[in-house]
């Protein structure tokens, strides 16, 4: 069971899942989304991740915290069942995981893919979904007004069918849930709690895994 | 979707090798299936004899000091020698989804470096070694001076399987080719109701790597009827084991 080759699309897909939480700002039109997103500078929140698989009788639950600072700093931290931290800061992407050897930096995917992701974050955090080279964005009217992202690239589409982002009905600019659909019956649902926006976040949060 | 054909020649060679090799355990008494039934059953202790679902955190230690951590979900149906295994990232992105029944492998999803046929085959071989008792009976067994039970048999692919069951319920397993070239080493510790809380697998062939599995949850599983295949291992031992709660059930 060897993992040797570079995995550009895999890395991109993995991080894109995280980046979805940085999609802030909500409106009826693209112009409104872009305008609302401009007001958001930082986010801090707790998340619960429910992984649904056909092989599982019940979803597998993971929990953690995430931090976002414009333009492109992210800390995505799992606390349970596996302690892990993914840091993205000034174009540098690193992942640390607590294993048998303590907190260890893991083998990175293709760096080039991470640079693409960082560019995506820059666009999305400003609500500029329509400018993405990798996702086609669509606002579904009616109901909860879901934003649907569909991969443009075939290799990417082989991994993620679509991403559905549902806005919070209570708080403008906040996200209620993100659903990443991989295939029929296999999807990841993320929900958020204790969301704090535009609070000051120390730079060390994005630099230090500890 | 691919189906990989089995290799039976290897089994014959190993059986022949058994008669001339003593291995690192030394000579052991040849078992009688009737009079040595109790010992035979103990030799089956590493493998649960009923359908079970496991979730593990898997730390892969790779050459060059690199490492990667994934989540593995494994559904085991010993009565049909059937396995379903899913590997995914911590974010939940599925990297590999494969099923094997007997020696056949069906891969429904594999991305990036997990897409090669060899990867799928070797991965499922590792999963099979860890979670399914060999279809072939244990050939030799004996008691060590420290009270451990030593068992020797033939693995799923004809390899020689050496199992050492320790008095504290932990166990070790090693597999060898017919010429006693080591293939895999497995160490199971921190057992809860017979299910290892930690498993370490060292690969000495088909790539060199170490997998460290930490149990997140385990539970008896209902296998959907339409997914059932003809039985190939009805002689599997039966154990009465309890569930280790999956996260979210506590």
Image (spheres, helix red, strand yellow):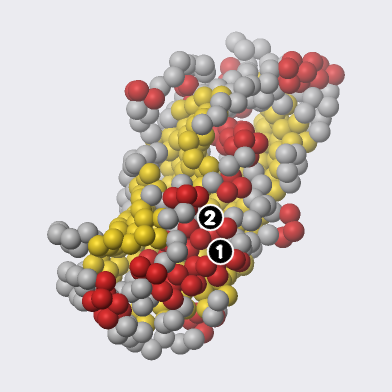
Instruction: Evaluate whether residue A174 shows in this view.
Output: no
B82 w.r.t. B250: above or below: above
B3 is higher (above) or lower (below) than B173: above
Same-chain status of marks 2 and 1 = yes
Question: What residue sits 35% from the left and 68% below the top?
Answer: A130
In the rendered image, residue A207, in percent from the top left (x then y), is placed at 54, 80
Q: Is residue B26 left or right of residue B219?
A: right
Callout 1 secondary element: helix
- Residue B45 location in percent, x, y? 56, 31
| Chain bearing mark 2 | A
Could you tell me residue B206's position as x and y percent? Answer: 73, 39
Let me know if residue B54 appears in the view.
yes
Residue plotted at (78% across, 36% down): B182
| Mark 2 or 1, nearer chain start | 2
Answer yes or no: do the residues labelled 2 and 1 have beta carbons within 8 Å? yes
In the image, A55 versus A175, the foreground residue is A175
Asked which quadrant contains residue A30, the reply is bottom left
- Residue furthest left in the image: A142
Please determine whether, in this image, residue B96 is positioned above or below residue A21. Answer: above
Q: Is B34 located above or below residue A51 in the figure? A: above
Quickly name the residue at label 1. A113
- The residue at the point 52 percent across, 78 percent down is A89
Q: Mark 2 sits on what residue?
A: A10
Helix, strand or loop at disc 2? helix
Residue situated in front as seen by the camera: B17 or B241: B17
Q: Nearer the viewer, residue B139 or A29?
A: A29
Is residue A65 rendered to the left or right of residue B58? left
Q: Residues within 10 Å of mark 1 (few under 14, many from 20)?
A: some
User: Image quadrant of residue A192?
Assistant: bottom left
Name the spot of residue B174 as percent of width and height, x first: 71, 35
What is the spatial separation of the Cα atoms under label 2 and label 1, in whole angstroms? 9 Å
Label 2 crowd (10 A; few <14 / some 14-19 / many >=20): many
């Amino acid at each position: 069971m060897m993992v040797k080759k570079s995995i550009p699309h895999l890395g991109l897909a993995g991080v894109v899942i995280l980046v979805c939480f940085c999609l802030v700002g909500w409106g009826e039109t693209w112009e409104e989304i872009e305008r609302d997103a401009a007001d958001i500078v930082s986010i801090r929140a707790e998340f619960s991740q429910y992984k649904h698989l056909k092989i599982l009788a019940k979803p597998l639950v993971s929990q953690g915290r995430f931090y976002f600072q414009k333009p492109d700093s992210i800390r995505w931290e799992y606390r349970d069942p596996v302690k892990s931290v993914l840091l993205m800061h000034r174009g540098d992407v690193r992942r640390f995981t607590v294993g048998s050897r303590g907190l260890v930096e893991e083998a990175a995917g293709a760096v080039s893919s991470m640079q693409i992701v960082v560019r995506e974050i820059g666009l999305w955090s400003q609500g500029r979904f329509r400018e993405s080279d990798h996702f086609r964005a669509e606002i579904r009217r009616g109901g909860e007004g879901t934003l649907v992202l569909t991969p443009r690239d075939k290799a990417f589409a082989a991994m993620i069918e679509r991403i559905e982002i549902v806005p919070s009905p209570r708080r403008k600019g906040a996200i209620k849930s993100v659903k990443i659909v991989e295939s029929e019956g296999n999807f990841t649902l993320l929900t958020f709690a204790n969301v704090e926006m535009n609070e000051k976040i120390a730079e060390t949060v994005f630099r230090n895994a500890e | 979707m691919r189906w990989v054909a089995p290799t039976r020649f290897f089994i014959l060679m190993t059986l022949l090798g058994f008669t001339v090799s003593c291995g690192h355990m030394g000579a052991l008494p040849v078992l009688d299936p009737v009079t040595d039934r109790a010992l035979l059953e103990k030799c089956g202790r590493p493998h649960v004899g009923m359908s079970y679902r496991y979730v593990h955190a898997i730390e892969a230690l790779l050459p060059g000091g690199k490492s990667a951590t994934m989540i593995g979900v494994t559904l085991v149906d010993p009565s049909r020698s059937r396995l379903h295994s899913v590997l995914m990232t911590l974010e939940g992105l599925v990297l590999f989804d494969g099923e094997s029944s007997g020696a056949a492998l069906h891969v429904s999803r594999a991305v990036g470096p997990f897409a090669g046929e060899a990867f799928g085959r070797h991965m499922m071989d590792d999963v099979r070694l860890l979670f399914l008792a060999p279809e072939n009976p244990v050939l030799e067994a004996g008691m060590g001076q420290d009270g451990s039970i030593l068992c020797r048999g033939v693995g799923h692919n004809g390899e020689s399987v050496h199992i050492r069951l320790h008095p504290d319920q932990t166990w070790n397993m090693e597999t060898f080719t017919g010429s006693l070239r080591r293939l895999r080493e497995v160490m199971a510790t921190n057992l809860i109701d017979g299910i290892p809380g930690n498993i370490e697998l060292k690969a000495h062939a088909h790539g060199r790597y170490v997998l460290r599995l930490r149990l997140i949850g385990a539970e008896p599983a209902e296998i959907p009827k339409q997914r059932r295949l003809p039985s190939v291992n009805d002689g599997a031992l039966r154990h009465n084991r309890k569930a280790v709660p999956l996260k979210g059930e506590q």
